[in-house]
């Protein structure tokens, strides 16, 4: 069983200037770097993109720039989540109008809805839109797990086309893969579990590590999807230390530090996030240097 949503989609960071404003030139450069690295698409305004501290107008501007730069070269799946269904619908419509090809919407956080509440929330979002919706399950951030049974019920909705699974539970992922309807995509939300997920029949990843190395990550996913597990394993183990160091502190603090070391952005974040802690910097640089991505 395959999905139209196969491949690598980069959960793109949002570059800021020193004064905290959007760095639009750097953003355009990042999009080109991703597309040239042969990813299938880009996901702006998600967790890695600090969507929680972007105003709605800023989010729409980011989506517009990403779509302008990507054009027909890659899909744009814009993050639009929250814990108010009405507000999520309004934000998702903004992103659609800004050019998003699809919407990534996280399980509502803080208010911890029941499975029935999650079901009705996502159905309402999908009913209100004329672009596809990708579910996002990340209980480590939302404190609420979208169970496999609920995901499968939502997969029956014509407007809900895939799920980004970041539960870390391969048993749950396998249950979704076992019974998903034809065409429903299952994407990893964790870089280091992408290869196992694809080996189970999944479709790819919404990736953090592809910010730094779109070429290798997208090649790994393509190899795995093609059944070339030897090559996929080689690339998985090459990238494993980088995958792990990206989460040595709260995402996106490490990946922004890495991209700054690579000269792709300036290391600016919005509070309450702060630059990577000093004791962790040698570790991040060491991993990048071992891969030949920066000087030692």
Image: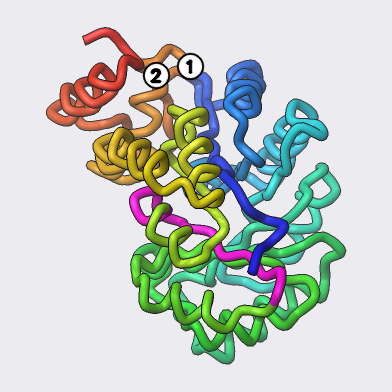
Magenta stretch encompasses residue 161: no
If the image is split into quadrants, where does the C terminus sit? top left
List the single residue furthest toward the top: 295
Q: Residue at x 51, y 31 (%)?
A: 214
Q: Residue at x 72, y 57 (%)?
A: 4
Nearer to the camera, 2 or 87: 2
If the image is split into quadrants, where does the N terminus sit? bottom right
Q: Residue at x 34, y 44 (%)?
A: 233
Nearer to the camera, 276 or 204: 204
Tell me residue 262's x, y (percent): 39, 15
Check whether the beta carbons of the residues at disc 1 and disc 2 lie within 8 A of each other: yes
Q: Residue at x 68, y 49 (%)?
A: 77
The quarter of the displayed image where residue 287 is located: top left
Does the rendering let one see residue 28? yes
Task: Give the left or right position of residue 280, taking residue 170 as reference.
Answer: left
Q: Residues within 10 Å of mark 1 (few under 14, many from 20)?
A: some
Does the rendering let one see residue 22? no
**Region rendered in magenta:** 182-194
Task: Give the structural element (helix, strand or loop) at label 2.
Answer: helix
Tell me residue 241's x, y (percent): 24, 37
Residue 95 shows which numbered tag?
none
Q: Residues within 10 Å of mark 2 (few under 14, many from 20)?
A: some
**Whether residue 22 is situated above or below residue 60 in the rendered picture:** above
Q: Colour scheme in the image?
A: rainbow
Q: CA distance from mark 1 to mark 2?
A: 6 Å
Tell me residue 257's x, y (percent): 34, 26
Q: Which residue is mark 2?
A: 260
**Whether residue 103 is situated above or below residue 110 in the rendered picture:** above
Q: Which residue is mark 1?
A: 264
Magenta stretch encompasses residue 183: yes
Task: Give the left or right position of residue 231, taking residue 222 as reference.
Answer: left
């Amino acid at each position: 069983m395959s999905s139209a949503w196969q491949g690598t989609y980069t959960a793109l960071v949002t570059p800021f200037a020193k004064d905290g404003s959007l760095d639009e030139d750097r953003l355009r450069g990042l999009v080109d770097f991703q597309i040239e690295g042969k990813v299938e698409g880009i996901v702006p305004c998600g967790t890695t993109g600090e969507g929680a501290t972007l105003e709605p107008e800023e989010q729409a501007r980011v989506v517009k720039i990403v779509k302008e730069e990507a054009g027909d070269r890659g899909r744009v799946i814009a993050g639009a989540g929250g814990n108010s269904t009405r507000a999520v619908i309004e934000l998702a419509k903004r992103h659609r109008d800004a050019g998003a090809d699809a919407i990534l919407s996280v399980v509502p956080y803080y208010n911890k809805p029941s499975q029935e509440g999650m079901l009705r929330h996502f159905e309402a979002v999908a009913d209100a839109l004329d672009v596809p919706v990708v579910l996002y399950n990340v209980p480590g951030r939302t404190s609420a797990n979208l169970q496999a049974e609920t995901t499968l019920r939502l997969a029956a909705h014509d407007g809900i086309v895939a799920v980004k699974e970041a539960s870390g539970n391969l048993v749950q992922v396998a249950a979704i893969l076992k019974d998903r309807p034809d065409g429903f995509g299952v994407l990893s939300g964790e870089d280091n579990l992408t290869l196992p997920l694809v080996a189970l029949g999944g479709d790819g990843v919404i990736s953090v590590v592809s910010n730094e190395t779109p070429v290798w990550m997208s090649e790994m996913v393509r190899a795995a999807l093609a059944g070339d597990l030897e090559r996929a394993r080689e690339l998985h183990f090459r990238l494993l230390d980088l995958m792990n160091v990206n989460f040595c502190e709260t995402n996106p603090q490490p990946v922004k530090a890495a991209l700054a070391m690579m000269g792709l952005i300036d290391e600016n974040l919005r509070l309450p996030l702060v630059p990577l802690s000093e004791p962790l910097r040698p570790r991040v640089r060491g991993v990048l240097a071992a891969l030949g991505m920066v000087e030692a």
